[in-house]
Structures are given as C-alpha cells and as structure tokens.
Image (spheres, grey):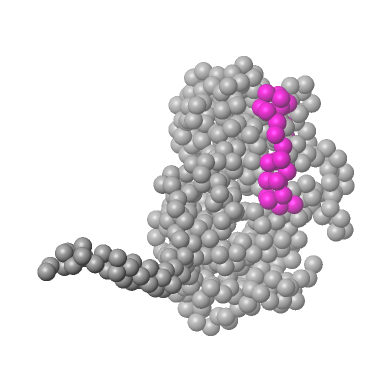
Amino acid sequence: MDRLTMLRQRPCRQLSVIATAGILLLIVYHVYHQPVLGQLSVHRLPLPKTASLSNRKHFDDLRLDDAQCQATFPGLTKDIDDMVAFGSFSVKYETRPDSPMLVRLEKGQLYIVHHETDKDIITAPYRDARLATLHQIHRAILTSPVPLPDTVLAVNVLDGPRNDTLSYSRAAFGAATPGSPLVTRAFLMPHFSFWGWPALPFVGSFQKAVEAVSTQHMPFSKKDARPVWRGTKRYNSAQHPKMREDLLAVAGGQRWADVQELAWGEGDGQTKNDQKVVATNALRIQDFCKYKYVVHTEGITYSGRLQFLQLCASVLLTPPMAWLQHTTHLVKPVYASDLLGVRTTEKETTSPAGKKWPRYSPSEANAVFVAPDWSDLYDAVTWLEAHLDVAEGIAQRQRSLFWEQQGYLSPAAEVCYWRALIQGWAKVAKVIDERWSKAPRGVPWEEFAMGYPKEVRDK
Ligand SMILES: *[C@@H]1O[C@H](CO)[C@@H](O)[C@H](O)[C@H]1NC(C)=O
C-alpha cells in the first residue's frame, strides 16, 4: 500500500496528526522568531526612494539611519561631500583664548578639550551659541542608530568662518575682508537657533517659530503685497558694503514697501543689563509671513534670519547670497533681471556671484535674486504682482522645500546632517599634531553643560 492510499483510507486520524504537528510548529516558530521580526521592523522603516508627501511622518524622527536620511533628504549633505573632497588635514591643537573650541568624541562620549575664554570675543551671544551647538552634537550622537567614529572636532562659534573648523557659514564667493585669503575648508554646521536663540526675544528657537508659522493659514492672495524688512543699518558685508543703506534709500518710507530700520532705543538688539531689549517696530517671524515678499539681507557675514524667512510661503527677495549656511545650496534663484527681460551683461554672468549661482526658470525657482543695490526691487515686485501665479509658485516651493513637504529644516534633517558631518569630518580630519599627545582628555560634556569648569558660567 503506498502512502497516498493509506492517507485516503484513514483520512481523519492522519489529518488531525498533521494538523496538530503543524500548529505546534507554528507556535514554536512564532515564539522564537517574533522578537527578531519585531526588531527588524522597527529598524527598517519602509521609505520611498525619493522625497514625497509620505516622508512627512519622518520629519520628527531623530533616529533615521544613513540610507533613510539620504532617501528622505536627497542632496542635503552636498556641502559636506565638497569639504571631504578637499582631502585630509590636521586638526591643530591650539589653546589660545580665542582658538576654536576642541571637542573630543570618544566611544560616543563628548569631552571639551579647549573652549575659548577671550572675554572680548566670547560674549553672551557666543556663549549661548556654543552651548546650543554642543547640545545639538550631543543629540545627534545620542539618537544615532550606529556608533559615530572617534574624532576631535574644532568648533568655531564666531560669525566669521575659520579654516579647518566647523563653522555656521562660509563665503560663497569673495573673502570677508577684501584682499584677504578665502576660508575654503569650513565645514558648515547647522545654526544654533535649531536648538535655541533665547537672546532674541521674538525668535526664541526655530521650533517655536515653526509652530507660530504653521498655525497661521493665510492664503497668498490675502497677504500684504509690500516687500517687508526690519534690520540694523550698520551690519554689511565686504561683498556688499552698502547693502542695507541702499535698501533703506530705495525702499525706506516708501508706500509700496514696509522697510524700516529697527528702532532699538538705547539697546543694541541683544541683552542689556540682562534685560532683553525689544525694538519698538520689530516683527515676529509669523508677522513676516503675512507679507507676500520678504526681503533678506546678509550681515557682516551670514544672517541667521534666513532659515526663519524660509519658513514663510512668501517670495524671498535677496541680492545674490554671498554666504552659505548648511542648506543654502538648496536655494534656486530666478533673477529679477530675467523676469523683467533685462539683458544680462557678460559682466554679471562672469562675476563671482554670477558664476556661483545658477539661473533657474520662474517655474522651478524658490527665491528671487535682485540687484545688490536694490535698483530693480520695485520693478521686480511690480512684475510679480502682475504675475501672481508665478509669485505664489515661488513662495510655495520655498515653504514646501524647507518645511511642509520636503522638510530640509526639520529636526530629522538636522540630526541626519550632524551625523553625516561628524562622519565626513572624521574621514579627513587627522589628529596627528604632535601636541595632541600631551593634550588633556577634556571636561566631560555632562559637566560642561552644567557650567563646569566654573569659567564657563562666568559672565
Ligand atoms: C584656508 O585654507 C586654504 C587651503 O589650504 C588656503 O588656500 C587659504 O588661504 C586659507 N585661508 C585662510 C584665511 O587662511
């Protein structure tokens, strides 16, 4: 009798034996394999290949791995790749009062080996920036799905960039001081306001601004049609030394614009006797977003207001930006001269700014570049008002890219960037300076964060 016949002859008993065995096997499999499957599904969130609306749920997720970061925020780390491509360099062991802070990263722990103590340079705003930046680095390390490499970071919290450091910004073209050499290898780090900026009462932190802007639902057509700006006249860059003065001359007090110099009274805009000084005509970030056209000016170097203006679904109007922050390479400008059909001179296209910034079509652009002397500002706004669909498209693409749909300024993008930055830096930063052999290990970050050594707290 073959097996098949046997099965047919005694079907009930055979089947129940097979079924029982099968169920037992399933239970055993379930018990032993479930935890493994569970872990895998936590670590491998399915992600689309390209950024899309469905990526939004990841924008608050601080634990994305490298592949997920790249899939969610393509092109985010371009500037890091550019810096790594310059090749290796030596991290200098320098401990002058004004030398950049040195932060040792060892087995996931941070140690502050040196921090700036020059009282004239390291004023309250810089101390805030330094603390915020260290918190940002720590957050990126704590939430990393993989261990980050051991290295020593040279962290420069001053406004101006320094070679072979992490800096908030770097010149896009032209040196900060005419004739002086360009700082070429400054790895761009995310601005400290992504952690907090308490010195500016109307800002507080990026997250606070995000919430204030996000709860505001103002259709583009309902926004104020005047270009808006508030600022201090005297902060100008070497690339555009008369930028703010010219802006006030062209648009200040004009009916078609809401451009005003900040009225600080006696303060300097920061902190006076520990009191936050507020200019009487200052605007909150959500108030800027109620205008169709937001005017951006850089300062002596970069302006920390850029990422705040980029939260608005408004048209950013700026001269070609001379300073790069960590996401500035994502700005796609259309030139006002192209909108107005003004013939571009060869001088403009071959100038340092012209070579740095490509020209995009109005349907791709997320910002508008105007002349550095603002001579075409009025015409640009008039043109955009006559082509509101174009204006609204530019405005929406800005908000969509940086926050709403592509989230390049989101918390997830920030930690993704920090981790790529630490990995990129560690690849090329060599700790071979002989002086390192005698260097102290450094103050553990946890102690430093609480104000130790004591001079960290001293005002
Ligand atoms: C920065 O480093 C580059 C490359 O080594 C060099 O050409 C440049 O002069 C340096 N800039 C400054 C300000 O020292």
Which residue appears at 73% of the width and 43% of the height?
A: 212
Whole-percent x, y for residue 109 in the image = 56, 75
**3 relative to 52, above or below:** below
Which residue appears at 60% of the width and 31% of the height?
A: 395
Whole-percent x, y for residue 145 in the image = 49, 65
Marker count (numbered): 0
Which residue appears at 76% of the width and 55% of the height?
A: 198
Q: Residue furthest front?
A: 9
The quarter of the picture where residue 454 lies is bottom right
Q: Would residue 23 appear left or right of 154 to someone viewing this image?
A: left
Viewport quadrant of the C terminus: bottom right
> Which residues make up the magenta segment?
204-229
Q: Residue furthest bottom?
A: 438
Whole-percent x, y for residue 277 in the image = 84, 49
Q: Would residue 94 appear left or right of 225 to someone viewing this image?
A: left
The quarter of the picture where residue 311 lies is top right
Foreground residue, 125 or 24?
24
Q: Residue furthest top?
A: 386
Foreground residue, 25 or 62?
25
Can residue 436 be seen here? The reply is: yes
Whole-percent x, y for residue 143 in the image = 56, 65
Magenta stretch: residue 141 in it? Answer: no
Viewport quadrant of the N terminus: bottom left
Foreground residue, 140 or 227?
140
Which residue appears at 51% of the width and 26% of the height?
A: 362
Can residue 347 be seen here? The reply is: no
Foreground residue, 141 or 331?
141
